[in-house]
Image (tube, helix red, strand yellow):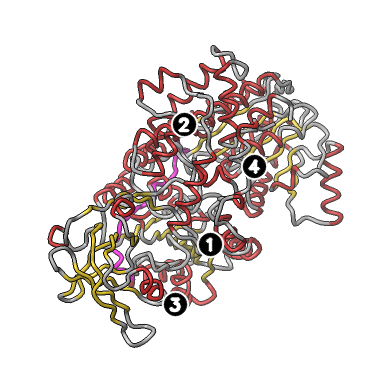
């Protein structure tokens, strides 16, 4: 049960003054449904203004606060014309305070002729005239205006304004009473961090690194603590010891020898599965490193030991691909493998359900449908989750309840993750790394091409398709937006452009398509009925079309290294030589240049992941994130890199030395777990 002291923070956001039915929808779009959400909706940046005595002391383009005396109102004569309020500073310099549209009506009341007002906004120049367009603030008293010298800028949704969000944050702060301290006093003193409520107030009111770090550490500590509780509880549970005799695995006729990394990972997994404590292991594999073969070895081991195995995929098309791959590889063993998705109905579905119940099906592959309430197993011993970042810890705990005893769990990810982020996101799991590629795999020819050679690239794609090949064309956005530069290609616009050239040979896939339409387009491409797939990064993982040997990535400088590597990995999956073209724009930063150079230089995903983290640091924003790990609400990449290990050590210390969750600091830590919605860590201990 949530501690009573948190009840005011978990009250519905409608309880804040100014939140009505009209504002509820945009607030929900921002994820703000409770007071706590507004409290942790921290500013993205701050506008810093300078108070100036007169306009001579200001620079054009500068954010200022200045006292002006209103002299005259000038209407433009039409609804679309600007409405200007002419005003003077203390020296007689003239400045137009300019409004458009309905804002002019308010200006008549706020700026009466002869009145002295403090104006906060950006000083611009229109011809020979100085002007401030739509001032941010108009105040009668200097104290009120000077309070806006540093102003927070929050992420918004349509229908919300900065003052509204700032008001909700301020009201939330008044409801946030002091909480017991969950950080060790020595750590607070060494880091120079403020107390919890003070940190929140400082973070909303100005740029304060100590306050931000303290709040990021809170989140990382809550996460580390919850993951350690999961790990601790998992080791208490009884699973079943699964020790195979090699009778099935020995019949496999793999088209290539296992790499050293595969052999090592299989041995680690076999060692875990031999224990009664349920395995909880993450298998990290670079693109093409052979995760599926490792998973098959683990599944066969479970079957040899008299148990069943299940493989869970996030999408139906990926589930079907895994099913076909496993069925072909395991054919010499004679085991029974079934496919189960949400689309399966009638007799075929009933037959599969009966086979799982009576044990005649050894391995089932499918989407989340394989763990629905109506699906029962004779003896589920191993669950393999592919693209595990699509499934949260709570879902994994739910899956663990499907067997008579807790089944072993092997999670797989195709994204090489830096060790710091592995610790932060998967601290409850043991980790195996596939950092070798199978012998004989051809390197992908990676080239960087200027976007102004687009016509040549399209003709090259045409020649490739005419020769019977298939290709991907990846764009960074779905639609153009007014806030983005005009040269950023939207997937829909590029699709329309390429469709004029290639007609029905082109299909489009992006995250906003209905699932059925997306699956149909992917199926057309996978089956060869379409030759060119235009997409956003939804194809980053899980698409395996060996005949596709050309990848074009538009505005490549906008992607992170790890993401570029994943996209590039969609080609090079067959025996033919593959090419990846990175189309770059004209405005290339030094970081972007380094990133593209590294893509040409290496195909080692683990090295690229580490370099990506180093290049990003804590402050650089690399375009809109469209897929991948959800990440943290407060802690950014740099803070995670600096503070994750410290949070992990502190969480372990709290559980092992400081009395767990029953000591004084442990009781405070319980509050922290609920505050950051890691309450499943506490519920787990209670069997809830």
Element class at badge 2: helix
- Judge whether 659 appears above or below 571 on screen: above
Who's the residue at 44% across and 45% down the image?
42
Instruction: Identify the residue position indicated by label 4 in the image.
Output: 329
Image spot of residue 684 (x, y percent): 68, 28
Tags 2 and 3 in contact by the CB under 8 Å rule?
Answer: no
Figure quadrant of the C terminus: top right
Image spot of residue 523 (x, y percent): 62, 62
CA–CA distance between discs 2 and 3?
A: 59 Å
Depth check, front residue: 653 or 531: 653
In primary-sequence order, the first of circles 4 and 3 is 4
In primary-sequence order, the first of circles 1 and 3 is 3
- Judge whether 244 appears above or below 29 on screen: above
Instruction: Identify the residue position indicated by label 2 in the image.
Output: 196
Q: Which residues are magenta?
A: 435-454
The residue mark sitting in front, 4 or 3, is 3
CA–CA distance between discs 2 and 1?
A: 41 Å
Which disc number belongs to residue 510?
1
Depth check, front residue: 373 or 171: 171
Who's the residue at 38% across and 65% down the image?
483
Element class at badge 1: loop
């Amino acid at each position: 049960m949530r501690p009573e002291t948190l009840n005011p923070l978990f009250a519905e956001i409608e309880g804040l003054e100014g939140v009505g039915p009209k504002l509820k929808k945009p607030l929900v779009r921002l994820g703000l449904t409770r007071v706590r959400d507004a409290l942790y909706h921290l500013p993205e940046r701050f506008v810093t203004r300078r108070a100036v005595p007169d306009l001579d002391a200001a620079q054009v383009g500068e954010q200022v606060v200045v006292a002006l005396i209103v002299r005259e109102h000038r209407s433009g004569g039409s609804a679309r014309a600007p409405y200007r309020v002419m005003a003077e500073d203390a020296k007689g310099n003239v400045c137009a305070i300019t409004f458009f549209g309905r804002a002019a009506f308010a200006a008549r009341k706020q700026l009466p002729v002869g009145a002295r007002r403090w104006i906060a906004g950006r000083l611009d120049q229109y011809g020979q005239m100085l002007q401030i367009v739509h001032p941010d603030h108009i105040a009668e008293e200097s104290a009120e205006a000077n309070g806006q010298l540093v102003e927070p800028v929050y992420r918004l949704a349509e229908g919300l304004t900065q003052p509204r969000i700032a008001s909700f944050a301020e009201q939330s702060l008044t409801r946030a009473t002091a909480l017991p301290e969950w950080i060790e006093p020595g750590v607070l003193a060494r880091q120079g961090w403020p107390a919890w409520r003070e940190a929140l107030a400082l973070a909303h009111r100005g740029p304060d690194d100590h306050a931000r770090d303290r709040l990021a550490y809170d989140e990382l500590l809550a996460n580390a603590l919850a993951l350690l509780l999961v790990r601790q509880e998992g080791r208490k549970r009884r699973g079943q010891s699964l020790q195979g005799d090699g009778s099935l695995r020995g019949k496999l006729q793999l088209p290539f020898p296992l790499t050293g990394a595969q052999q090592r990972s299989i041995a680690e997994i076999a060692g875990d599965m031999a224990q009664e404590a349920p395995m909880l292991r993450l298998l990290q594999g670079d693109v093409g490193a052979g995760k599926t073969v490792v998973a098959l070895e683990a599944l066969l081991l479970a079957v040899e030991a008299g148990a069943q195995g299940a493989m869970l995929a996030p999408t139906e098309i990926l589930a079907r691909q895994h099913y076909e791959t496993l069925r072909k590889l395991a054919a010499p063993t004679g085991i029974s493998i079934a496919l189960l998705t949400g689309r399966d109905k009638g007799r075929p579905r009933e037959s599969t359900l009966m086979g799982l119940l009576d044990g005649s099906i050894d391995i089932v592959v499918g989407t989340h449908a394989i763990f629905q309430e109506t699906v029962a197993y004779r003896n589920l011993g191993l669950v393999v989750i592919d693209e595990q970042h699509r499934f949260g810890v709570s879902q994994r705990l739910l899956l663990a309840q499907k067997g008579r005893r807790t089944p072993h769990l092997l999670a797989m990810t195709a994204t090489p993750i830096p060790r710091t982020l592995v610790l932060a996101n998967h601290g409850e799991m043991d980790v195996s790394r596939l950092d070798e590629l199978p012998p004989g795999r051809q390197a992908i020819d990676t080239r960087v091409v200027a976007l102004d050679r687009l016509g040549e690239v399209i003709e090259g794609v045409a020649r490739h398709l005419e020769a019977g090949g298939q290709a991907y064309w990846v764009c960074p956005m779905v639609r153009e937006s007014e806030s983005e530069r005009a040269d950023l290609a939207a997937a829909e616009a590029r699709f329309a452009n390429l469709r004029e050239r290639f007609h029905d040979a082109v299909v489009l896939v992006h995250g906003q398509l209905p699932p059925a339409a997306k699956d149909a387009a992917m199926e057309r491409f996978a089956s060869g009925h379409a030759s060119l797939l235009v997409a956003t990064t939804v194809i980053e993982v899980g698409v395996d079309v060996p005949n596709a040997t050309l990848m074009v990535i538009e505005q490549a400088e906008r992607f992170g290294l790890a993401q570029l590597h994943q996209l590039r990995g969609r080609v090079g999956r067959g025996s033919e030589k593959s090419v990846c073209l990175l189309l770059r724009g004209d405005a290339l930063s030094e970081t972007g240049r380094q990133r593209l150079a590294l893509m040409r230089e290496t195909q080692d995903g683990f090295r690229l992941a580490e370099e990506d983290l180093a290049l990003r640091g804590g402050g650089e924003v690399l375009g809109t994130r469209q897929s991948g790990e959800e990440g943290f609400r407060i802690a950014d990449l740099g803070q995670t890199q600096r503070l994750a290990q410290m949070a992990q050590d502190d969480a372990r210390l709290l559980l092992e030395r400081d009395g767990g969750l029953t000591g004084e600091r442990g009781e405070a830590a319980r509050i922290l777990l609920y505050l950051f919605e890691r309450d499943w860590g506490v519920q787990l201990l209670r069997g809830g």
